[in-house]
Amino acid sequence: MLSDNIKNLRKQKGYTQETLAQALNIVRQTVSKWEKGYSVPDADMLEKLSEVLEVPVSDLLGKPSEAAEQASELEKISAQLAILNEQMAREMARRKRNRKIKIIIASVIFGLLFIFVASILITHPVSSSIMSGDASNVRVLERQSSLYSQEEIESAIEVIKRDFENDWNGCTLNTIYYAGDEVCADETRERGVKTIVLMSDFTTGNYDFGSLNSNYTYTNWNWILIENEHGRWEHIDHGYG
């Protein structure tokens, strides 16, 4: 093949693609395309290539050397090159059409998949496992304490709001407040560690909550927090007292 002949003769003459391109006054990428069979030199360039490589044009084309002696050799070569270029152009066009067809098919599949997923989301409620609890509009009721500062109580409330949003999927926290000094003092004595108790009302959503009823408002729900070794409130338990 012409591509193999160019490559082999170039190496035999000690040329790199870069040095051969310089000798022909072209870019290296053109030589690379010839050798890969992506394109072919025209008749004028083929003749110049034969001069640089010091071989007959017939050797480049793989034809018998006698053909070089014919007066119409260049015309035949030009015709052959034209045929090769036309064949490569057709092949490139075919590949381009195939790419377009693949893109269209992929787009159709993606569109159908999107419609399918959207229809499932519309006709089926979203699982509570991928939702979060809502504590954004919770009403905090202020209660006075001689055991804890207002800052300590607010810090404990923030812990419960955060845990509620992370773990109580689909539920809404309505109100939350300090349970009172007496309750907290009893819990502290029983646990032997600084303890604060909060109470709240919250509503479950239209989902399966295991032991909790759906679409139900729970009142006077206890949240128990202890002070950990870092001096921060840690939520350890909840439920009805």
Image (cartoon, helix red, strand yellow):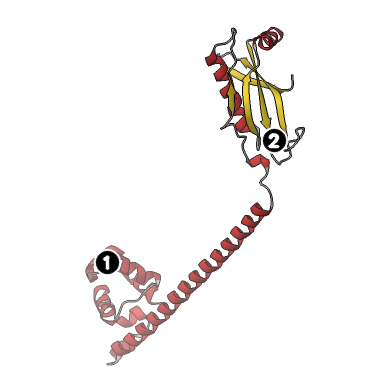
Marks 2/1: CA–CA distance: 73 Å
In the image, what residue occupies the spot 36% across and 74% down?
39
Mark 1, secondary structure of its residue: loop
Residue 121, relative to residue 166: is it above or below? Answer: below
Residue 121, relative to residue 198: is it above or below? Answer: below
Q: Where is residue 78 in the image (x, y as percent from the top left)?
A: 32, 85
Question: Nearest the camera: 139 or 160?
Answer: 139
Query: In this view of the protein, can residue 184 be seen by the observer?
Result: yes
Residue 116, picture quadrant? bottom right
Query: In this view of the protein, can residue 16 be seen by the observer?
Result: no
Q: Where is residue 223 in the image (x, y as percent from the top left)?
A: 67, 21
Q: In this view, does 88 lie to the left or right of 214?
A: left
Total tally of numbered discs in the picture: 2
- Amino acid at circle 2: Thr
Q: Pointer 1: what residue?
A: 27
Q: Position of residue 7 (x, y in %)?
A: 36, 70
Report the disc number at residue 65.
Answer: none
Q: In this view, does 148 lie to the left or right of 187?
A: left
Question: Nearest the camera: 131 or 90?
Answer: 131
Residue 13, picture quadrant? bottom left
Instruction: Determine crowd level at label 1: few under 14, some 14-19, many 20+ residues with C-alpha closer than 10 A.
Output: some
Mark 2, secondary structure of its residue: loop
Question: Nearest the camera: 29 or 91?
Answer: 91
In the image, what residue occupies the spot 22% across and 69% down?
25
Q: Pointer 2: what residue?
A: 204
Question: Nearest the camera: 146 or 90?
Answer: 146
Q: Give the residue at the far bottom of this rendering.
A: 71
Q: In which quarter of the image is the N terminus?
A: bottom left
Residue 206, relative to residue 27: is it above or below? Answer: above
Residue 48, relative to residue 134: is it above or below? Answer: below
Q: Which of marks 2 and 1 is in front?
A: 2
